[in-house]
Each structure stands twice: as C-alpha cells, then as structure tokens.
Image (cartoon, helix red, strand yellow):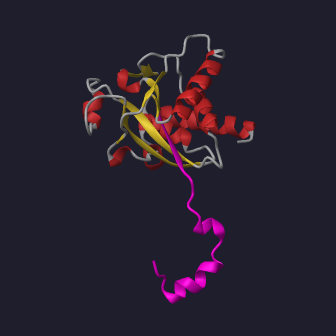
C-alpha cells in the first residue's frame, strides 16, 4: 500500500500508540436488566464499550418484545469490550458479583423472568476457567447459593438502538431514577474507596 507523500512525511511524527492497533477483548454476561449492567460496567477503567443485547437462547435475531415473553430462551446481556492492558478478565468477573444479586433465580429485584437470569457466556476456555474460579470464590461470601449459569456463548445479538446507553440518555426516566441511579451512585462510592 502506498501512502500519499504528505501522510508519509507525517507518519514518523505520530506517537506509537496512535499507530499500534489496540488489543480489545470481549466478555458477555447478564445480571438482570441490561440497562443496569450497562451503566455499571461503564464505570470501570479499561472498559472501552458496552453493548446491550441478547444471548443464551435459541431464536435468531430476537427482538426485545420476543425476549420479554420468556419463550426465546435468551437473557438480557451486555457485551463488554475491554482493554486487557488496563483491566483484567478476572476484575470484570469479580465486579459482576457486586453489580447484581447472583443468588436470585430468574430475575433481579422486581424484574422477574428467565430473561433477567444471572449468566456468564464464555467465548474461550480462559473465560470459562476465570468465571468458574470467580464464582467459587464469590460463593464463599454469599449466604445463599449463587444461581449464575456459566455456559458457552453461541451468538450475541445486539439489542435495538433505543436500548443502547439507556441510562446515559434517560437519567430522569422513572426506572433510571429509582433503580439505576442509586445503584450507580453506590458503585461509584465503592470503586472510589477501592481506588479503582
């Protein structure tokens, strides 16, 4: 590939970080309403992007309305794109036990149904091992049994555009004000005290 002369002259002046491809990895998990987990994971350093979506079921290209019926087998999940140089897979999974109640079966709080279940969908053997290890360690801190499923990721289906960045776009909406905002405030405080 040939560069135009002006670009070829500027290339040596660019910082190496601009020229190098950034290594990004992804993790898919669900812990109740994806608006909540989306807002929670955006607080972590090293998280580059969060996408709300559906996974763990059998229907192809499901819609929110279909998933809400509980008949597709899908859960509301998020796909977290992160920089492993800034945060580890282990930290992301350990944080999972803080952002939701992994002992509640098929729901979170008043959000009830299999689409709100606690689930980690692994894409690699490394992710499976990290999830199982973290779940075992977290199980020692909870009085009740952790019900989180750890299953292979078959396919992640992005949710409709109106679900993306929902809390950021609608902080005054009722659910956001009553459920998500207090959770985010609590997580910010915990992260600050942990120095993250």
Is residue 50 in sight in this rendering?
Answer: yes
Q: Is any atom of residue 177 visible in this view?
A: no
Compared to 156, does 132 lie above or below?
above
Does 28 appear in magenta? Answer: yes
- Residue in view at x 27 percent, y 36 percent: 62
Name the residue rendered at 42%, 21% in the picture.
107
Give, as a single range, the part of the protein colored magenta.
1-29
In this rendering, is residue 96 above or below 142? Answer: below
- The x and y percentages for residue 150 are 48, 24
Residue 183: x and y in percent read: 56, 33
x and y percentages locating residue 21 in the rendered image: 56, 61
Q: Quadrant of residue 73?
A: top left
Residue 128 position, x and y percent, is 53, 29
Quarter that holds the C terminus: top right
Tell me the residue at 64%/39% (across/down): 188
Q: Where, quadrant-wise, is the N terminus in this rendering?
A: bottom left
């Amino acid at each position: 590939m040939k560069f135009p002369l002006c670009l070829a002259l500027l290339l040596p002046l660019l910082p190496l970080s601009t020229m190098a491809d950034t290594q990004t990895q992804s993790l898919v998990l669900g812990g109740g309403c994806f608006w909540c987990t989306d807002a929670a994971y955006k607080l972590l350093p090293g998280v580059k992007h969060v996408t709300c979506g559906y996974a763990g079921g059998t229907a192809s290209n499901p819609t929110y309305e279909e998933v809400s019926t509980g008949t597709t087998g899908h859960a509301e999940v998020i796909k977290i794109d992160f920089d492993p140089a800034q945060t580890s897979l282990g930290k992301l999974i350990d944080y999972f036990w803080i952002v939701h109640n992994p002992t509640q079966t098929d729901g979170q709080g008043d959000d009830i149904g299999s689409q709100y279940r606690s689930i980690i969908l692994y894409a690699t053997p490394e992710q499976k091992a990290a999830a199982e290890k973290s779940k075992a360690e977290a199980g020692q801190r909870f009085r009740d049994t952790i019900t989180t499923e750890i299953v292979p990721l078959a396919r992640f289906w992005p949710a409709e555009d109106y679900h993306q960045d929902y809390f950021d776009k609608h902080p005054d909406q009722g659910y956001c004000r009553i459920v998500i905002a207090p959770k985010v405030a609590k997580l910010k405080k915990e992260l600050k005290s942990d120095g993250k």
